[in-house]
C-alpha cells in the first residue's frame, strides 16, 4: 500500500507536558500529561483508575462512559487537559442501587461493558428524560454489550427507575 | 494521533483567523486518532461563554454554537417552539455524545464514508486527486443525489436536516467580521472539490445558529431509517414540517438526510404540495419530484425507493406527531 501518498503530512511535534489538576471522585489528582492524552488514558494509565474500560477508543461502544459534572460522557473522545475544573465520577466513585440491580438481574456476562453501562444508567436516571422501556432502550443505545445481556440490563434499570415496564 | 499543542481561548479575538478549534471533540478527536486530521495546535473554545446560550431574539431563537446537542434538544424553548429540531437531534448519536457534542461542531462533522476513514484507500475528500474508492466499492450508505465523479460521500448530521427544513441561518465570525449564511448555502456538494465540506472560510468560527419565527409546532415529524433502531447513521432520514388549514396544506417543508453531501431540499416539491390535500397520492407525487435525478450505485440503488416511501410515511406521521417513536423509528 502506498500509504505515504494517501495520507497527509504529519506536522512537527509541538505539544509539551502540562501540569493539570483533575477532580475525580471527590479528590484532586495532579498529573503531568501531553495534550493528546485522552481523559480515558489519563484515568487508566496515569491514575490507576482502571474500572473505566477502553473498548473501541472511538466513541462507538460506551465502555469508557464516566460522569462529568453529573452528565454521562465518553472519556475516549475528550482530552484530559480539557477537563480541568470539571467534577469527574468514575465507576470507582459510584454507589448506587443500580449496582445491586445489575447483580440481581444477571445484567452482565463478561463484565467488560458493565462499568460504562452503570455510569450511563446513573447519568440517564439523573437526566430523567426516559419514561417508557422503549425510551430507556433508546437512551442506553450508546452502550454496547457483546455478550448480549441487553435485556437484563434494561430490566435492571427499569427495576431501579420504577414506572411502566412494557 | 500526532502530538499537538493545546491553547484555551478566552475571547473571540483569541480565535478568529486561527484554526483548529475543539469544543466537544467527539468528531475531531476521532479523526485525529485515525490521523485524518492532524492540526499542530488545538484551540479549545469552550471558555467563550457568549456562545453557550439559547436565547430569544426579535425574529426567533438563537442557538449558541457551543451549547451542547443535549442542552439544545431539551431546552424548553426548543422543545416547545421547534419540536422538529428537538426530535432530529435526539435521533442522532448516543446520549453520551449528545452531552458532549456542540451545535457548531454538529454542523462541521465530516462524512463517515468508510473509505474516507481508511487511510490506505484512495479518497478524493481526504487526499484530492487520489480517486474515489466508494464509487466502485461497497457503497451501501453512500449518496444518491448531488454526487460527482469525484465523491459520493454523505453528510451524516440529523440536526442539520431539521435546520435545513426550518430555514435556519448560520452566524459566523472571522477576520473580516461577522456574516450570516443561509442554511442551504452552508454545506456544499462535492463537485470537483470534495475536500471542502462547507462554505466556512479558513479562520471563521460559527458563533450561533438562528431559527426564524416559523416554528411548525402542530404538524412535524422526523423519521430515521437505519440498520439498527438506535445509535447508527441514517440510510435515509426525513424532516417534514407542515402548516395545515383543515386538510389543506398551506406550507410544506421536506428535507432529506443520508442521501447527499448536504441536507437535501427541493423547493419545487414543497410548492407542489401548497394548496393540496394531505393525502398519500400528493405526498407520493412530491416524493417523486424530490428524488428526480437520483442515481443509485451498486449497493445503494434501493435508497431511491426507500427515500420516496420514507417521505410519504413521514408526511403522514407529521399529520399526527404523537405517532413518532423514540429514536425516530417508523410508526407502528
Image (tube, coloured by chain):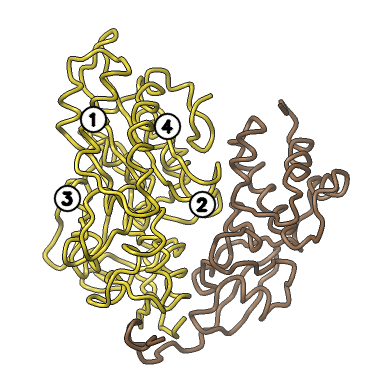
Between the C-alphas of marks 4 and 3, the distance is 26 Å
The chain that hosts pointer 1 is B
Q: Are marks 1 and 4 on the same chain?
A: yes
Q: From the viewer's side, name the closer residue of B239 and B176.
A: B239
Q: Point out the residue furthest to the front here.
A: B298
How far apart marks 3 and 2 lie (CA) works out to: 28 Å
Q: Are marks 4 and 2 on the same chain?
A: yes
**Which is more foreground, mark 3 or mark 1?**
3
Mark 3 — residue?
A: B185
- The residue lying at 36 percent from left, 47 percent from top is B258
Mark drawn on residue A72:
none
Earlier sequence position, callout 1 versus callout 4: 4
Residue B257: image quadrant is top left
Q: Which chain is brown?
A: A
Instruction: Look at 39% across and 45% down and name the residue there.
Output: B158
Name the residue beneath numbered marker 4: B79
State the CA–CA distance, disc 1 to disc 4.
Answer: 14 Å
Label 2 or label 1, whichever comes before in sequence order: 2
Q: Is residue A1 above or below residue B290?
A: below
Q: CA distance from mark 3 to mark 1?
A: 20 Å
Mark 2 belongs to which subunit?
A: B
Identify the residue under disc 2: B99
The image's mark for residue B213 is: 1
Q: Earlier in the sequence, mark 3 or mark 1?
A: 3
Q: Are marks 3 and 2 on the same chain?
A: yes
User: Hey, which quadrant is residue B236 in on the image?
Assistant: top left
Residue at 35% of width from left, 82% of height from top? Answer: A7
User: Measured from the top left, where is residue A163 in percent x and y?
Assistant: 72, 27
Contact (CB < 8 A) between labels 3 and 1? no
Amino acid at each position: 500500500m502506498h500509504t505515504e501518498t494517501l495520507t497527509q503530512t504529519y506536522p512537527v511535534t509541538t505539544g509539551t507536558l502540562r501540569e493539570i489538576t483533575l477532580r475525580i471522585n471527590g479528590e484532586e489528582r495532579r498529573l503531568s500529561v501531553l495534550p493528546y492524552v485522552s481523559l480515558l488514558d489519563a484515568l487508566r494509565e496515569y491514575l490507576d483508575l482502571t474500572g473505566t474500560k477502553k473498548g473501541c477508543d472511538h466513541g462507538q461502544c460506551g465502555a469508557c462512559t464516566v460522569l462529568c459534572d453529573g452528565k454521562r460522557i465518553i472519556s475516549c473522545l475528550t482530552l484530559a487537559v480539557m477537563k480541568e475544573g470539571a467534577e469527574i465520577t468514575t465507576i470507582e466513585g459510584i454507589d448506587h442501587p443500580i449496582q445491586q440491580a445489575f447483580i440481581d438481574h444477571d445484567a452482565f456476562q463478561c463484565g467488560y461493558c458493565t462499568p460504562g453501562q452503570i455510569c450511563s444508567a446513573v447519568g440517564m436516571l439523573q437526566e430523567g428524560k426516559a419514561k417508557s422501556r422503549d425510551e430507556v432502550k433508546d437512551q442506553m443505545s450508546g452502550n454496547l454489550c457483546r455478550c448480549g445481556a441487553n435485556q437484563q440490563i434494561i430490566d435492571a434499570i427499569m427495576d431501579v427507575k420504577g414506572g411502566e415496564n412494557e | 494521533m500526532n502530538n499537538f499543542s493545546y491553547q484555551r481561548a478566552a475571547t473571540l479575538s483569541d480565535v478568529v483567523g486561527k484554526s483548529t478549534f475543539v469544543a466537544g471533540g467527539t468528531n475531531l478527536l476521532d479523526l485525529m486518532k485515525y490521523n485524518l486530521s492532524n492540526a499542530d495546535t488545538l484551540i479549545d473554545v469552550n471558555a467563550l461563554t457568549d456562545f453557550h446560550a439559547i436565547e430569544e431574539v426579535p425574529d426567533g431563537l438563537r442557538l449558541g454554537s457551543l451549547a451542547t446537542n443535549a442542552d439544545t434538544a431539551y431546552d424548553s424553548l426548543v422543545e416547545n417552539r421547534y419540536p422538529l429540531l428537538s426530535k432530529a437531534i435526539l435521533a442522532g448519536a448516543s446520549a453520551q455524545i449528545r452531552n458532549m457534542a456542540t451545535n457548531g461542531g454538529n454542523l462541521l462533522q465530516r462524512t463517515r464514508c468508510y473509505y474516507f476513514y481508511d487511510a490506505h484507500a484512495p479518497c478524493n475528500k481526504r487526499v484530492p486527486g487520489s480517486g474515489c474508492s466508494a464509487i466502485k466499492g461497497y457503497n451501501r450508505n453512500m449518496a444518491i443525489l448531488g454526487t460527482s465523479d469525484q465523491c459520493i460521500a454523505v453528510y451524516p448530521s440529523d440536526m442539520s436536516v431539521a435546520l435545513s427544513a426550518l430555514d435556519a441561518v448560520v452566524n459566523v465570525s472571522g477576520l473580516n467580521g461577522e456574516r450570516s449564511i443561509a442554511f442551504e448555502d452552508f454545506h456544499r456538494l462535492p463537485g470537483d472539490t470534495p475536500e471542502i465540506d462547507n462554505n466556512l472560510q479558513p479562520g471563521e468560527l460559527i458563533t450561533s445558529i438562528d431559527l426564524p419565527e416559523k416554528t411548525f409546532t402542530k404538524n412535524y415529524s422526523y423519521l430515521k431509517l437505519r440498520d439498527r433502531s438506535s445509535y447508527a447513521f441514517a440510510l435515509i432520514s426525513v424532516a417534514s414540517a407542515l402548516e395545515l388549514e383543515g386538510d389543506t396544506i398551506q406550507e410544506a417543508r421536506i428535507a432529506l438526510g443520508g442521501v447527499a453531501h448536504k441536507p437535501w431540499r427541493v423547493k419545487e416539491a414543497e410548492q407542489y404540495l401548497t394548496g393540496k390535500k394531505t393525502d398519500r397520492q400528493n405526498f407520493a407525487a412530491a416524493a417523486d419530484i424530490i428524488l428526480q435525478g437520483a442515481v443509485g450505485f451498486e449497493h445503494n440503488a434501493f435508497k431511491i425507493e426507500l427515500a420516496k416511501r420514507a417521505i410519504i410515511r413521514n408526511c403522514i406521521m407529521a399529520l399526527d406527531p404523537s405517532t413518532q417513536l423514540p429514536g425516530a423509528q417508523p410508526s407502528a
